[in-house]
Amino acid sequence: MWEKKEEKKEQKEEDLLKELCGNDAKLYHCLSSFLYMHPLEAISKKDLDILTEEAEKSGDFEPALDKAIFEAAQNPGEMGRYIKVIQNLASKTIHATEQKKEKVEKEGLADYVASLRGRIENQKFMVERTEDIINVASKFYNETLMELGEHERREARAEERRKAEGEESRIRGQEKEVRETRKRERRGMGRKEKRKAEKQDKREELAAEERKEARGEERKEAEAQERRTEELEKTGREARKKERRGN
């Protein structure tokens, strides 16, 4: 079941990217290699400057490039600055990859050479279409993060339900144990004491029933609130989708 949910989510993200890229197959091909379904997990938490410094030493500019695209998507007001940053990182990636390609060509690794050529073409495309890439990445990440937030809130609500159900079960067990204890105690009582205890038991049972009904009302209200929240989230997703198509 978990694997099917993951496959469904991956398909949803793929469909979102296709929707944002429209008929631009080259843009889709490029971005499908650079955007992440879980950006907060996949993209380094380090500052972009630190990642760039590390890349200069290692020759691997992809972590810095991923970070730059993500930051650019989150800061549309700084488009000009990030265009230059991304183009610079992509150009350095091209240079580093061409050097690697020359080396593996001498070693006769044809499949690897083809892979490196594809990477170089992707980076050249990124240099040429940086603004388009940032625009699509911004919409993609905004929607992805929005839905991830909704998913986390749904998980939190589900956890609250599980806790409430566990507490309800605990209370029922506790009340049952109290009733059985009182029943055992009555067996050793005289008639007068037993009648008095039975009256007390009825009062306790009525109070327990009232508490049970109150908890039931609380559950109903929580369930209704959850339905309202899910409906609002669904409406929001549909509105954002309509807005994307309008753009």
Image: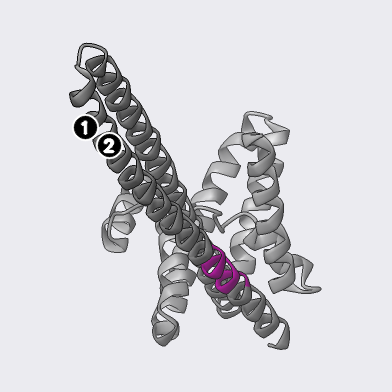
Q: Is disc 2 surrounded by few (<14), some (14 to 19) or many (20+) residues within 10 Å?
A: few
**Residue 212 against residue 192 in the figure, above or below:** below
Q: Nearer the viewer, residue 234 or 76?
A: 234
**Residue 217 against residue 170 in the figure, above or below:** below
Question: Which residue corresponds to mark 1?
Answer: 196
Q: Secondary structure at mark 2?
A: helix
Is residue 92 at all visible to an observer of this figure?
no
Residue numbers of the magenta segment = 227-234
Dominant secondary structure of the magenta stretch? helix
**Residue 143 against residue 55 in the figure, above or below:** below
Q: Which residue sits at x=33%, y=43%?
A: 208
Q: Amino acid at mark 1?
A: Lys
Q: Nearer the viewer, residue 247 or 1?
A: 1
Q: Is residue 184 magenta?
A: no
Q: Amino acid at mark 2?
A: Lys
Q: Quadrant of residue 191?
A: top left
Q: Which residue sits at x=62%, y=36%?
A: 2
18 on left or right of 185? right
Q: Position of residue 66 (x, y in %)?
A: 46, 58
Distance, label 2 to label 1, CA atoms, is 5 Å
Q: Which residue sits at x=47%, y=73%?
A: 73
Question: Which residue corresponds to mark 2?
Answer: 199
